Image: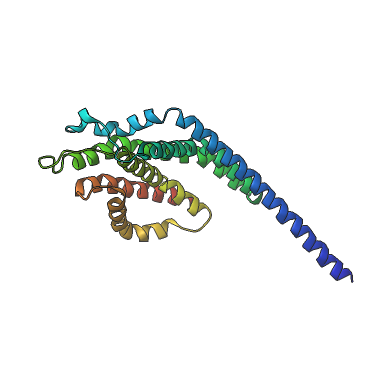
Amino acid sequence: FLKRQKISQIMKNSEISLRDHFMELRKRLIISVLAVLIGTGITFSFWQDIVLLLEQPARSFGEYSEQGLVFTEVTEVLSTSFKISMLGGFILAFPIIAYQIIRFISPGLRTREKIYLLILLPFSVLAFLTGVAFAYFILTPSALHFLLTFGSDVATPFIKISNIVSVMIRLLFWMGLCFQMPIIMFVLAKIGLITYKNLGTFRKYWLILAFVLAAIITPTFDPINQLIVAVPLLILYEIGFVLTWGTQ
């Protein structure tokens, strides 16, 4: 009887703990969604300035510098404004979202792991912004120059607003994500999933994978632009290798 009562009490405590866990998750999700919605509303107030910023790298090439953007569908401009606003809202809300994630998982982390997480978060944001800056100032001018001047003798470029926004967001996002690689490698090494020996062995495969990723990320097929992406990926891998080696 006492054994059954003890098992029943354990199951009851487990149900309470699980319910509290889901309530905490719900709370964090609500706060995160509200932060994104508020950020989206703020971004919507100046979405036109963001479009002008995104198309700026293309303005110095050919006849496009005089004609500007066009749209061919009735809802194209409206849908583009929503797309930009939602993405901008997520970016503005990211610090709050990251904080909510940390608060949610912190009870299961040790003190040292919490410290690592808090220290790496600013570096993660900085790395992402560095990748975005690299894509905006170095990658996109070269890529757009190729795309807008190739075949210019037989056709005049009329660029849709949705197209230039999609291309720019794709390049900026993926390069920002790629620049997270050293930090991700460092975290994986800290929790014991990888070692610098594993990375040293994988280096020869990464040489090929970097060019495959470059071909996927870049909107062009010319080797120059793919080199512009592949070389930083190789350098980032070596930075991650050094960080991993320093932890073991």
Q: Where is residue 113 drawn, in percent x and y?
A: 59, 47
Height in image: 16 above or below 168? Answer: below
Asked if residue 66 lies left or right of residue 14, the reply is left
Q: How many marks?
A: 0
Task: Determine the residue positioned at 10% across, 40% down.
Answer: 153
Q: Is residue 81 visible?
A: yes
Q: Where is residue 118 drawn, in percent x and y?
A: 56, 40
Asked if residue 31 lies left or right of residue 226, the reply is right
| Colour pattern | rainbow
Q: Closest to the observer: 57 or 164?
A: 164
Task: Determine the residue positioned at 36% across, 41% down.
Answer: 169
Q: Where is residue 133 drawn, in percent x and y?
A: 35, 35
Height in image: 201 above or below 228? Answer: below
Asked if residue 176 lies left or right of residue 56, the reply is right
Q: Is residue 246 visible?
A: no
Task: Determine the residue positioned at 27% across, 35% down.
Answer: 70
Q: Closest to the observer: 83 or 59?
A: 83
Specify the quadrant that holds the N terminus.
bottom right
Asked if residue 229 lies left or right of residue 34, the reply is left
Q: Quadrant of residue 225?
A: top left
Question: Residue lying furthest right in this view?
Answer: 1
Task: Determine the residue positioned at 29% across, 50% down.
Answer: 214
Q: Where is residue 134 drawn, in percent x and y?
A: 33, 38
Question: Residue lying furthest left in this view?
Answer: 153
Height in image: 51 above or below 217? Answer: above
Q: Closest to the observer: 132 or 82?
A: 82
Q: Closest to the observer: 134 or 97?
A: 97
Question: Residue lying furthest front in this view?
Answer: 74
